[in-house]
Amino acid sequence: MRVVLLCHAATSAIRTAAFAGDEPLDERGLRQAAELAGRMPRADQVVRAPSLRCRQTATAVGLDSAAPDARLAGCDFGAWRGRTLDELVATTPDAVTAWLTEPAACPHGGESLSALLERAGRWLDSVPSGHTERGQPVRTVLAVADPTVIRAAVVHAIDARPRSIWRIDVTPLSQTVLTGSAGRWSLRSIGSPAEQP
């Protein structure tokens, strides 16, 4: 099985280093995604997170048929949505420290890192191994997702410590490729759009 995780295009939250809500792609992100139309890898199944930014990315790159999957939803940052990390460090440094160092901490009232990692791992381990409409086995799944979910999937795939999630860079429109199956995933590549074939 091959899983290609496409990060959504740029949003205002990404450009300002703010915690994401459900903001749309910005103009530049839409344009950059449209430039990739027709250049996505072949996939037997295409899914996406339910967010507006993932839907817009899927449409812009030509993946209109991508089915929404709630398990791919971005991390719920609760009361931190729309705020920057710098702002939070200045106003609630202890809460930020707890969130960055304790995977079960949930100072923003949304989803903890532990919960995100568990959800992303369950999704990855349940990636369909059924058949296409033509009766062929599903061998490649392409998913449009948020960077937090992609990082969590990588942490799960390589069986890394939860805090390793902060050491993985996932840029807008990058593709992360995982191969294997439940319990035995491997990280094949993480690349920016310019580095993709």
Image (spheres, rainbow, N blue to C red):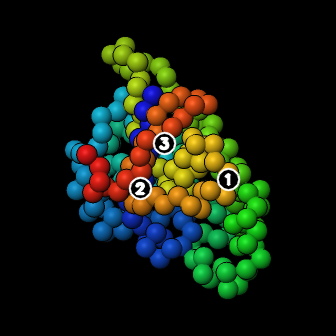
Specify the amino acid type for callout 1: Pro
Task: Name which of mark 3 and mark 1 comes first in the sequence.
Answer: 1
Three-letter amino acid code of the residue under disc 3: Leu
Horizontal side of 119 relative to 194 (left or right) equals: right
Quick check: can you spot residue 143? no
Q: Please tell me which residue is depicted at 60% across the width and 56% down the height of the picture.
A: 165
Q: Residue at x 66, y 79 (%)?
A: 88
Q: Position of residue 81 (x, y in %)?
A: 60, 69
Residue pointed to by mark 3:
187
Label 3 crowd bin: few (<14), some (14–19), many (20+), radius 10 Å: some
The crowd level at tag 1 (other Cα within 10 Å; few <14, some 14-19, many 20+) is some
Judge from the rendering whether residue 138 lies leftward or rightward of residue 103; answer left or right.
left
Q: Report if residue 141 is visible in the image.
A: yes
Q: Earlier in the sequence, mark 2 or mark 1?
A: 2
What amino acid is labelled 2 in the image? His
Residue at x 48% of width, y 70% of height:
13
Instruction: Please give the residue where the numbered disc 2 appears in the rendered image.
Output: 8
Q: Which mark is residue 162?
A: 1
Q: Which residue occupies 47% across, 50% down? A: 145
Check disc 2: other Cα within 10 Å, few if <14, some if 14-19, many if 20+: many
What is the secondary structure assignment of the residue under circle 3?
strand
Instruction: Please tell me which of labels 3 and 2 falls first in the chain.
Output: 2
Report x, y in % for residue 93.
73, 80
Q: In this view, which residue lies farthest toward the top? A: 135
Q: CA distance from mark 2 to mark 1?
A: 23 Å
